[in-house]
Amino acid sequence: MKELVGMLPDEMEQFVLSLGEKPFRARQITDWIYKKGVTDIEMMTDLSGSFRLLLSHNARVTLPAVTKVTEAADGTVKFLLELADGAAIESVIIPDEGRTTLCVSSQTGCALGCAFCMTGRLGKRRDLTAGEIVGQVLVARDYLGTRGEALTNIVFMGMGEPLLNYDEVRRALTLILGDRGLSFSWRHVTVSTAGIPEGITRLGKEVLVNLAVSLNAPDDQTRDRIMPMNRKYPLDALMAALAAYPLKRGRRITIEYVLLSGVNDTEDHARALVRLVRGIPVKINLIPFNPFPGAPFSRPDYGRVLGFQEILISAHLNAIIRKSKGGGIAAACGQLVAASSTRGRSGGNENGTA
Ligand code: SAH
Ligand code: SF4
């Protein structure tokens, strides 16, 4: 049995040929799946009945199963999804200022273990396949479609480190961006990384897409403390990869900076951040820490966040404070799955985490 979701167009042609059909049938199948959102092979009515039968004996179209949908008052929708092997992941729809963004997961946990991140506490479980990544988009698009809404943006900011699952993420991007896939404009697709320099360099060469980097600290000492991966990939290597990253005219790299009270939020940190990014076209997203039970950090008070932003703005940097969306339903990075996997699948904590 071949899985059709996640197959690249040329692979689909090869597959169709192997079943004795003409290659153009591949395009009909991808149109059904990606353009029309049809997953039932029987409904692919421009294929002959005999080919549909043959296809359904040799292939399937699998989307992640939705185990739970939680909607917050601010419109954020979180999906708890179950994959074919029973693994649980989440993806989140975040409506904001005329955009509707889906935050997708790229792994079922994360090996990088950032101290402020609940996904990091799960540890690495496994990489997602391209089909499982694109499947999250299809599920969300379908959900929005039933409400007459459209999905406009995709960010790889869910569970996992996308650049440590490079090949499958790249395949997923090919399908998300391609006209034989979901046809998203690259302007509306962002890959967020904790900062894997070789992955950044490779991505810059191979795929046109927006890049976001979770910097979170302006010096190695602070970063080592909250992001253990920094010991393997220290800031000088990361900043060199960012300086060399190819950008279209007027585009910037997004720097994400989770503010942790007393850890990385002082005026000195802000000034060090200004020096660190000098010469690199960036915009900075300041994200006040989203607390979770047992977290060893707290969120700085708002005045401190504003003071931090002010230093960046005074240095002519573009810096915004990102509102924490979906806080009441634990929609930050990995929180629902973490809650349900420690309490049993039916006992996820929906509202105690923010
Ligand atoms: N692994 C990638 C993508 C997923 S993490 C990366 O690190 O970029 C997505 C974002 O969520 C990161 O910017 C991370 O810094 C942020 N994040 C994780 N836990 C958080 C928390 N408790 N509060 C606020 N932001 C958090
Ligand atoms: Fe992994 Fe990103 Fe969470 Fe760090 S912030 S543990 S890299 S998912």
Image (cartoon, rainbow, N blue to C red):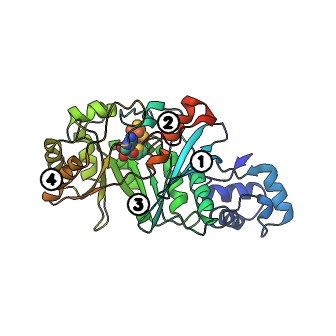
Lower position in the chain sequence, tag 3 or tag 4: 3
Mark 1–mark 3 distance (CA, rounded to whole Å) = 21 Å
Depth order, front residue of 222/204: 222
Queried on whether the Cβ of the residue with tag 4 lies below 8 angstroms from ligand 1, the answer reads: no
- The answer to the question of whether label 3 and label 2 lie on touching residues, with beta carbons closer than 8 A, is no
Position above or below: 131 against 17: above
Ligand 2 position by quadrant:
top left
Residue 16's mark?
none
Position above or below: 217 against 55: above
Q: Quadrant of the C terminus?
A: top left
User: Which residue position is annotated with label 4?
Assistant: 311
Residue 132's mark?
1
Q: Quadrant of the N terminus?
A: top right
User: Which residue position is annotated with label 3?
Assistant: 208
Quadrant in the picture for residue 298:
top left
* Amino acid residing under circle 1: Glu
Q: Secondary structure at mark 2?
A: loop
User: Which residue position is annotated with label 2?
Assistant: 109
Q: Secondary structure at mark 4?
A: helix
Lower position in the chain sequence, tag 1 or tag 3: 1
